[in-house]
């Protein structure tokens, strides 16, 4: 049995985890694996690889845009899984997740998807439009066989009973959607409501660590999210920083520094 | 229990379900848990029936179209949904859903629209009940269905353009779903067709079922038989067809004919004939037949008719196609235009472009002289006049 890289990471670093999302095939078709290496070297703790989809229902304008660029570049789920074979030579320890919508996965075939993801050393899968009930009924065993762990989203509207059910269903982390809205939105605007929600979930003493995502865009929102959670997830803000950058690797390094680096001294 | 009712998880055979992100779970679950009780509630039923009668103008006539009958060589009845208030069947559903939204305590209504008929029907009931209304409409559709955009604005609704993808019905639906994700507590999403996550396909089918309920009664009165040989309806998402088929589903003697938009032709690359071109996939929260490429990306459909320009189909219809309970035909843009002219000139009824597809399909049926056909004339063609005049060179 391969190690659970989530567990290893959380044992080593229980606080302030930085999880970064990029869209596969963006900005250029073959940027994905090199960018993952750059981000890990710069200090990312967990990496999410977005599988572009034509109709990303839960995503805001930035990820809609990067997804359509990636599709125009020629990215497909099959090509991505090919490119990821061998990624573990460069990134032995960083937990890696695939995040995407269900339809491309079903067209490839869930079994084939799991087989290839597992062979590449992927640790977790986020499929926002695969409800937990459907996962439990249809795919749980398959995921187990392939040492893949699902990540479930919870929102401020998710009931305590349901949060506990989702917590039981996985062994990775829980993705706390920070507030109402899409990825890249301004959920962190209502600071008080967000902190109250994060504290409420913190008090449930769940099995899985909690990472906060949606609308986390800078050091201030990252630090605020980490106060009552184990870390936070950033996608749209990073992709915006890569947009049009002459050197996306340099832009990625600078972005990570702005989030986790020492405070910029006042002039 | 009919074979054609969804199971507890919302499946019609292999199609249906509720593939929604967690952000929508509380809203959809609330609806799922309550819709059957609310629909069965006496106060709801009374209010719904009364509004259908006094506001919508039901029952709509069943009209024996003598000259069309002569033309096609069988007895053709038109179910005049075009005579509903706002000009299409769509209001049967919105009247029901606005009453449902009130009972769920919702203050804000969102909707998607293709041809604009569902948008107008939603804006209408929101005005009637004093609720805020936001309608998402593809930017391309706003251009080709201008009169309906104007009507929605006159009724006090906000029309927001969907500018992603092909800027048509699919994209408007994406934007409406994104709005619902962003407004998780006070908003009800009035879906206009038998699409979306469970329980929407069943909810909308039940609210449109009044069409076939009346058809049976009226046919008995007029023709001395409750069951026609054929029921014909166009299908985009499939709400008027679901309503027209509903009370005939368990009558194997009645042949159900669903008419999709072939666009420029099913092999042209510009088509919306989902049962011909689609494979099982997931769109807007439902597992159904879906036009997509080999990598599972949804492909852009084409139809001259904004209401049929959709790459999916309701899960009930996917099941009717798969199980061969219904015969699916596809009609090109050009044939639909000719049929619209034919109906206008023979019966003095200008049909919507969507309904014109159903009329055109009569040519493709092996009709006998003693056959009785009921065709659901789902909407009127005022909104399409600009297209008719241009495409038929009448301007």
Image: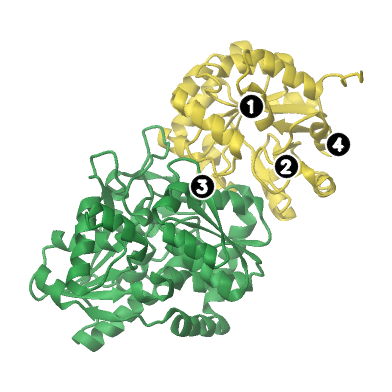
Chain colours: A yellow, B green
Q: Which mark is residue B162?
A: 3
Q: Which mark is residue A186?
A: 2
Chain at numbered mark 3: B
Q: Quadrant of the C terminus of chain B?
A: bottom left
User: Mark 4 near mark 2, Cβ–Cβ under 8 Å?
Assistant: no
Chain at numbered mark 2: A
Label 2: few (<14), some or many (≥20) within 10 Å? some
User: Mark 4 near mark 3, Cβ–Cβ under 8 Å?
Assistant: no
User: Mark 2 near mark 1, Cβ–Cβ under 8 Å?
Assistant: no
Q: Which mark is residue A227?
A: 4
User: Mark 4 near mark 1, Cβ–Cβ under 8 Å?
Assistant: no
A124 horizontally vs B208: left or right = right
Element under disc 2: loop
Element under disc 3: strand
- Label 4, label 1: how far apart the Cα atoms are: 24 Å
Residue A123: name its quadrant.
top right
User: Mark 2 near mark 3, Cβ–Cβ under 8 Å?
Assistant: no
């Amino acid at each position: 049995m391969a190690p659970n890289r989530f567990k290893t990471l959380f044992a080593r670093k229980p606080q302030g985890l930085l999880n970064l999302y990029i869209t596969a095939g963006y900005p250029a078709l073959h940027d994905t694996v090199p960018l993952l290496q750059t981000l890990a070297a710069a200090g990312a703790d967990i990496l999410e690889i977005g599988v572009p989809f034509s109709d990303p229902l839960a995503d805001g304008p930035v990820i809609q845009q990067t997804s359509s660029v990636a599709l125009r570049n020629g990215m497909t789920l099959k090509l991505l899984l090919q490119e990821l074979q061998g990624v573990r030579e460069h990134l032995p320890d960083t937990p890696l997740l695939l995040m995407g919508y269900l339809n491309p996965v079903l067209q490839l075939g869930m079994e084939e998807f799991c087989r290839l993801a597992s062979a590449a050393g992927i640790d977790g899968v986020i499929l926002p439009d695969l409800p937990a009930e459907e996962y439990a009924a249809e795919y749980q065993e398959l995921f187990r066989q392939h040492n893949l762990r699902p990540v479930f989203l919870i929102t401020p509207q998710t009931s305590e009973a349901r949060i506990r059910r989702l917590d039981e269903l996985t062994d990775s982390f829980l993705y706390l959607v920070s507030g109402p809205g899409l990825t890249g939105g301004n959920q962190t605007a209502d600071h008080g409501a967000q902190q109250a929600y994060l504290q409420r979930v913190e008090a449930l003493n769940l099995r899985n660590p909690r990472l906060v995502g949606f609308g986390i865009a800078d050091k201030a929102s990252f630090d605020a999210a980490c106060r009552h959670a184990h870390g936070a997830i950033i996608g749209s803000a990073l992709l915006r920083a890569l947009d049009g950058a002459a050197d996306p690797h340099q832009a990625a390094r600078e972005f990570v520094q702005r989030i986790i680096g020492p405070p910029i001294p006042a002039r | 229990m009919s074979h054609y009712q969804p199971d507890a998880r919302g499946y019609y055979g292999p199609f249906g379900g509720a593939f929604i992100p967690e952000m929508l779970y509380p809203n959809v679950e609330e609806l799922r848990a309550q819709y059957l009780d609310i629909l069965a509630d006496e106060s709801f039923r009374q209010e719904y029936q009364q509004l259908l009668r006094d506001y919508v103008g039901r029952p709509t006539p069943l009209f024996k179209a003598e000259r069309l009958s002569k033309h096609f060589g069988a007895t053709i009845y038109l179910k005049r949904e075009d005579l509903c208030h706002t000009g299409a069947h769509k209001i049967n559903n919105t009247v029901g859903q606005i009453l449902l939204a009130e009972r769920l305590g919702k203050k804000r209504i969102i909707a998607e629209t293709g041809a604009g008929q569902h948008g107008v029907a939603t804006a209408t009931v929101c005005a009637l009940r004093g609720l805020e209304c936001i309608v998402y409409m593809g930017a391309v559709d706003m251009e080709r269905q201008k009169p309906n955009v104007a009507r929605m604005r006159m009724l006090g609704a906000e029309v927001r353009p969907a500018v992603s993808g092909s800027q048509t019905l699919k994209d408007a639906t994406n934007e409406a779903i994104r709005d619902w994700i962003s407004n998780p507590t006070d908003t009800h999403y009035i879906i206009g067709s038998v699409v979306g996550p469970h329980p929407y396909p069943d909810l909308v089918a039940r609210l449109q079922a009044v069409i076939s309920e009346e058809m049976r009664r009226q046919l008995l009165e007029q023709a001395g038989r409750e069951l026609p040989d054929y029921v014909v309806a166009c299908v985009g998402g499939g709400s008027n067809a679901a309503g027209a088929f509903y009370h005939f589903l368990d009558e194997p003697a009645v042949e159900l004919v669903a008419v999709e938009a072939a666009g420029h032709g099913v092999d042209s690359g510009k088509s919306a004939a989902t049962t011909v071109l689609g494979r099982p996939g997931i769109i807007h929260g439902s597992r159904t037949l879906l036009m997509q490429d080999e990598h599972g990306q949804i492909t852009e459909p084409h139809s001259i008719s904004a209401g049929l320009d959709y790459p999916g189909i309701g899960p009930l219809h996917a099941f009717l196609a798969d199980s061969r309970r219904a015969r699916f035909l596809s009609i090109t843009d050009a044939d639909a235009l000719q049929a619209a002219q034919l109906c206008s000139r023979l019966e003095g009824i200008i049909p919507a472009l969507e309904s014109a597809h159903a009329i055109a399909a009569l040519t493709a049926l092996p009709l006998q002289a003693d056959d009785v056909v009921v065709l659901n004339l789902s909407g009127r063609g005022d909104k399409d006049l600009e297209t008719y005049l241009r495409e038929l060179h009448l301007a």
